[in-house]
Amino acid sequence: MPYELENRLVIGVASSAVFDLTDSDAIFKSHGEEEYRKFQEENLYNPLPKGIAFPFIKRLLALNDLRADADDPFVEVVLLSRNDPDTGLRVMKTIEHYKLGMTRAIFMQGRSPYEYIPALNIALFLSGNKSDVDAAIKAGHPAGQVLDSKFDDDEDDNSLRIAFDFDGVLAGDESESVMQASGLSAFHAHEVKNVMQPHHPGPLKEFLVRVAKIQSAEEHHKRQNPAYENRIRVSIVTARNAPSHERALKTLKSWGVMANDAFFLGGIEKGRVLAVLKPHIFFDDQSGHLQSASTVVPSVHIPFGVTNQEKAPSPLSGAD
């Protein structure tokens, strides 16, 4: 029987999201493809350093221990690479070195593999390559650019903390469009008027829904094993404040999900809260918010919606 993906949380990652490709990228840019190939071959058994999304991916995959059958995991992470199979071999060796539990990969020499996101039922594609992420979002796929950020892989901490902005990330940009066009008062009036109407889904809505299913599995496991401590914690960190908070919460409920924490900051700098919350990954659609966030936590830009039209390039552009 074929390996089914429909009931799993499937993540697609470029090597630039999970590993530090600084040295490899410098060789490619300064000396070209032939020297790049030689460099990767010479360093085949020298693992790449950990990258920004490494702690997130490692902890996500670790949740598969909740399954009694190792062949039926909750989470599947697939490598989507611009490398060809030969130059990508070092990445596969690095995955093996870190025991990440990633066995599936797509290598497409010099081409972006984002077109395969629907075929693989991928709920989130992470890459350091801005053009690949922009193209994926434009095609309607869930994608984010991993930014140069502070990150810490605490080996003693097996929890997984995920933080989301709301508008333009979990929800669509309908309300944000009102905000941009008519200001804060009109935005609040719009949200109060439509409080009983759930928002249209944004790029990462399905990712959150699938994470929530694993949270439900954790609750079931805890009932059978009372000493178990839940590992996943989901937080909403948004510039919304009252009275626009209610529609956001009702929307989450209509999707069958509930955040563990919600921060309705009303314009307070998000980095202040994120520095305390310490999520393993934070998703936001606005570069302005990410400037402070990336100095304290691993940050991902979701280049979706009205706030990303005619925007300047975001801080990082990677090789893969």
Image: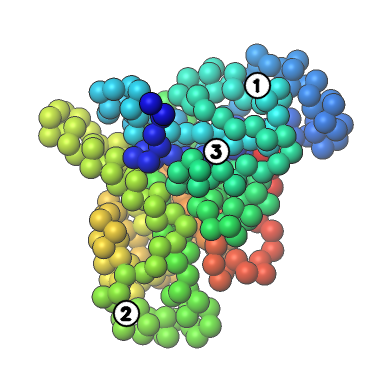
* Residue at x-position 63% and y-position 35%: 81
* Residue at x-position 45% and y-position 74%: 174
Mark 1 surroundings: few (<14), some (14-19) or many (≥20) residues within 10 A: some
Give the x, y percent position of residue 226: 13, 30
Amino acid type of the residue tagged 1 in the rendering: Leu
Q: CA distance from mark 3 to mark 1?
A: 15 Å
The residue under label 1 is 89
> Element under label 3?
strand
* Residue at x-position 71% and y-position 41%: 111
The relative height of residue 277 versus residue 20 in the rendered view (above or below) is: below
Left or right, residue 84 beside residue 231: right
Residue 243 - label: none
Give the x, y percent position of residue 2: 41, 29
The relative height of residue 302 versus residue 1 in the rendered view (above or below) is: below
**The furthest residue to the right:** 31
Which circle's residue, 3 or 1, is located before the other in the chain? 3
Q: Choose top left, top right, bottom left or bottom right for residue 150.
A: top right
Q: CA distance from mark 3 to mark 2?
A: 37 Å
Which circle's residue, 2 or 1, is located before the other in the chain? 1
Left or right, residue 189 beside residue 101: left
Amino acid type of the residue tagged 3 in the rendering: Val
The residue under label 3 is 13
Mark 3 surroundings: few (<14), some (14-19) or many (≥20) residues within 10 A: many
Could you say which is closer to the camera, residue 58 or residue 278?
A: 58
Give the x, y percent position of residue 53: 52, 38
Q: Pick the quarter of the image with the N terminus.
A: top left
The residue under label 2 is 194
**The furthest residue to the front:** 1
Q: CA distance from mark 2 to mark 1?
A: 52 Å
Amino acid type of the residue tagged 2 in the rendering: Asn
Could you say which is closer to the camera, residue 159 or residue 258?
A: 258
Q: From this viewpoint, is residue 12 visible?
A: yes
